[in-house]
Image (cartoon, rainbow, N blue to C red):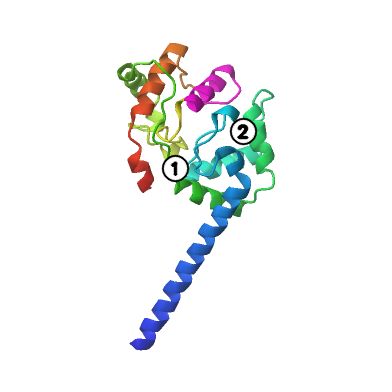
Amino acid sequence: MKKFMVLSACLLSGVLSAESTVAEQAEQIFKERCTACHLDDGHGLKSMKVASIAGLPRWYVAQQLRHFRDGKRGAHINDVEGKMMQSMTQTLDDKSVAFLGKHIQGMKPLKKRQTIKGGDKVVGEKIYKKDCASCHGENAEGVRSLLAPPLTVQIDWYLEGQLKKFNEGIRSHVEGSKNPTKDQTKDLLAYLSSIDNSKDEEK
């Protein structure tokens, strides 16, 4: 019995050590590759139009990193930020991509996400339920089976910029999806910014 307990303790210690090593490697990769633009907390930098990525699910982070690396995203000549990401991801292998996904998912998402004045969140909720919820989820929590990211961890000015890219054809959107008008965008962003994302920290 004592030998069994010792063996179990050794195995558990090995697992914890391996997990610790993965976490340390992931953090190091994040520091080397991401913090210059996305900052230490992963909350992004408006002056460079860099997204807040803290709290995004690992599956979405990994998918987007591979898309940048493989030229599926950021290919448009006018996608300046996308081309920066393409350049950064060229030397990322799949292991590093997985590590980054795990690390970023574990970061605390941005709480104060509203910077754009105006907009009616009540109207915005109606727009969201009608045009967005079928893909992004009833509460904008994201739907993995559709590869649709949560919209509750992202700051409003970045979402506004991405909607503009969708409207201008700089980024591709799901076929048949409806992009909001300028006025609708303000209402939609007001609603999304008002959603409590505390539960996103519990993923």
Report the residue that reaches farthest toward the bottom. 2
Q: Answer above or below: position of 104 versus 166.
A: below
**Label 1, on which residue?**
55
Q: Secondary structure at mark 2?
A: loop
Q: Tag 1's secondary structure? A: loop
Expressed as whole percent of the image width and height from the top left, the position of residue 147 reads 47, 37
Identity of the residue drawn at 45% across and 33% down: 154
Residue 174 is at least partly visible in this image: no
Q: Residue at x 50, y 36 (%)?
A: 52
Position in image of residue 68 (x %, y %): 63, 38
- Report the magenta residues as a range: 157-174
Q: Which residue is identified by label 2?
A: 73
Question: Is residue 115 placed above or below 58 in the rendered structure?
Answer: above
Q: Main secondary structure of the magenta part?
A: helix
Task: Name which residue lies at 37% across and 22% down.
Answer: 190
Label 1 crowd bin: few (<14), some (14–19), many (20+), radius 10 Å: many
Quadrant of the image occupied by residue 151: top left
